[in-house]
Amino acid sequence: MNNKKLFFKTSKLGFVLGAVMLVALTEFAGYADGQNAGIAVQPPVVPPAVLSPDNYVYYPSYGVYFNSSRRQYAYLKGDAWVSSPEPSGVTIGVLQASPSVRMDFHDAPAHHHAEMVKKYPKNWTAPGAHQERK
């Protein structure tokens, strides 16, 4: 006994109409997705660069400044200021062993050098530093 009941009768015409409607609906859905819907991609949020202020140590015996933030030495070469990863005319070890003063300015040494030379002459030593006697 076959108790299958169909909800609707199918014919070739019904099948063709159903297929046309299905194609039309899928194309409309594709058109809507292509034009109105989509994925919005936001550019990545990049935090602003954290810039540390320029901090200088001055070596009066050599007229050289060390910028600890940039890891560069600044000094006069003729009439021009030079910035370099190594000081000129002295090794880093000798420079670091010489008297030094931490500066309280954070801009270019060129703006303060005349004052620093007067305040810290080449033969300057830190107060309380042990001086060698000859």
Image: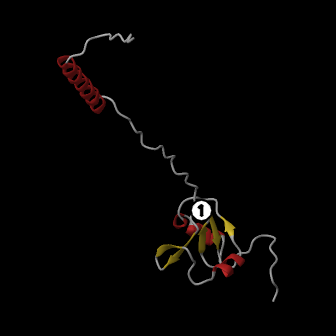
Residue in the foreground of this view, choosing between 54 and 29: 29
- Residue sitting at x 68%, y 80%: 93
Q: Is residue 19 above or below residue 75?
A: above
Name the residue furthest bottom. 134
Q: Is residue 2 above or below residue 116?
A: above
In the picture, measured across the screen, residue 119 lies left or right of residue 6, that is right
In the picture, measured across the screen, residue 37 lies left or right of residue 72, that is left
Q: Quadrant of residue 17?
A: top left
- In the rendered image, residue 29, in percent from the top left (x then y), is placed at 29, 26
In the picture, measured across the screen, residue 43 lies left or right of residue 121, that is left
- Residue sitting at x 24%, y 15%: 10
Name the residue furthest front. 1
Question: The disc labelled 1 sits on which kind of residue?
Answer: Ser
- In the rendered image, residue 106, in percent from the top left (x then y), is placed at 58, 58
Quarter of the image for the C terminus: give it. Answer: bottom right
Q: Which residue is mark 1?
A: 69
- In the rendered image, residue 45, in percent from the top left (x then y), is placed at 48, 43
Q: Report helix, strand or loop for mark 1.
A: loop
Residue in the foreground of this view, choosing between 47 and 117: 47
- Residue sitting at x 58%, y 56%: 53
Q: Quadrant of residue 94?
A: bottom right
Total numbered circles: 1
